[in-house]
Amino acid sequence: MMFDPIYFVFLAPALLLSLWASFRTKSAFNKYSQVRTATGLTGAEAAARMLAGAGIADVKIVAHRGLLTDHYNPMTKTLALSEQVYGVPSIAAVGVACHEAGHAIQHATKYAPLALRSLLVPTANIGSSLGYLVMAFGLVLASTKMVIFGALLFSAVLLFQFVTLPVEFDASARAKKLAVANGLVLPQEREGIDRVLNAAALTYVAAAVSTLLTLLYFLFRAGLLGGRRD
């Protein structure tokens, strides 16, 4: 099963989409990392102003090691910005920082999809670690019931990723709008932020597509979608 060519046929679209999304994200980020903001604001400063404009004063902004490791932790109310974002006054840095600030605003305003995503984290972790293995063993043992059980576990990952999409899209929409409204970038600099965040959004779409096609492959191989075991 590890060398099943059908597996690669199923996953090829997701692989191509992932490669394209990764290329677009790195390309856009690298390009606009070289373009300084007219305001001279760094990523950390832009995020702080965006949060202040939303009336949020209890979120801590910290530097975080790694490439594009930016994230917001609702448990600790910490907005972590990577080295390429935290102290850099570029359009790319401001766009990414404002996106993460968008998540903090979602948290403060009790944005429903964000709350739902947080609730799904435990089951998604279980599904991610066990679902694939259970489905794989189900095929090896020719156990349709085991494949179905594994598919149910793995579906938790897919549900989590589907819920993640509106969360990420909304955070980007907030960043694009508020970056200009709060004077963090000039209106003509909005295009750069759009390109960086739109490219990054594709990575979440690619992840969801990959999970969906993986699930369909196992169901197909188990004969549940018209396929059959060889």
Image (cartoon, rainbow, N blue to C red):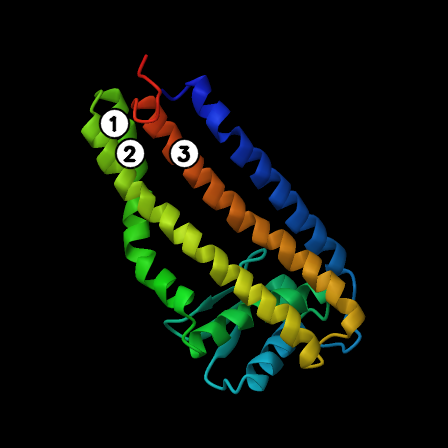
Mark 2 Cα-neighbour bin, 10 Å: few <14, some 14–19, many ≥20: some
Checking the image for residue 214, the label placed there is 3
Q: Is residue 124 left or right of residue 191?
A: left
Q: Give the quadrant of the C terminus.
A: top left
Residue 201 is situated, as x and y percent measured from the top left of the image, at: 57, 54
Give residue 95's quadrant in the image: bottom right
Read off the residue under disc 2.
133
Distance between mark 2 and mark 3 Cα atoms: 12 Å
Q: Is residue 143 above or below residue 177?
A: above
Farthest residue toward the top? 230
Of the pair 122 and 115, the residue shown nearer to us: 115
Of the pair 179 and 130, the residue shown nearer to us: 179
For marks 2 and 3, the one nearer the N-term is 2
Q: Is residue 19 above or below residue 230?
A: below
Mark 3 Cα-neighbour bin, 10 Å: few <14, some 14–19, many ≥20: many
For image coordinates 34% across by 28% down, the residue present is: 218
Read off the residue under disc 1.
137
Residue 179 is situated, as x and y percent measured from the top left of the image, at: 67, 74
Residue 219 is situated, as x and y percent measured from the top left of the image, at: 33, 29
Q: Is residue 86 above or below residue 4?
A: below
Q: Is residue 165 left or right of residue 149?
A: right
Is label 2 or label 3 in front? Answer: 3
Give residue 214's quadrant in the image: top left
**Label 1 secondary element:** helix
Q: Name the kind of residue labelled 1 in the image.
A: Phe
Residues at marks 2 and 1 touching, judged by CB atoms closer than 8 Å: yes
**Label 3 secondary element:** helix
Q: Is residue 9 above or below residue 38?
A: above
Give residue 92's quadrant in the image: bottom right
For image coordinates 58% across by 55% down, the residue present is: 67
Distance between mark 1 and mark 3 Cα atoms: 15 Å
Is label 1 or label 3 in front? Answer: 3
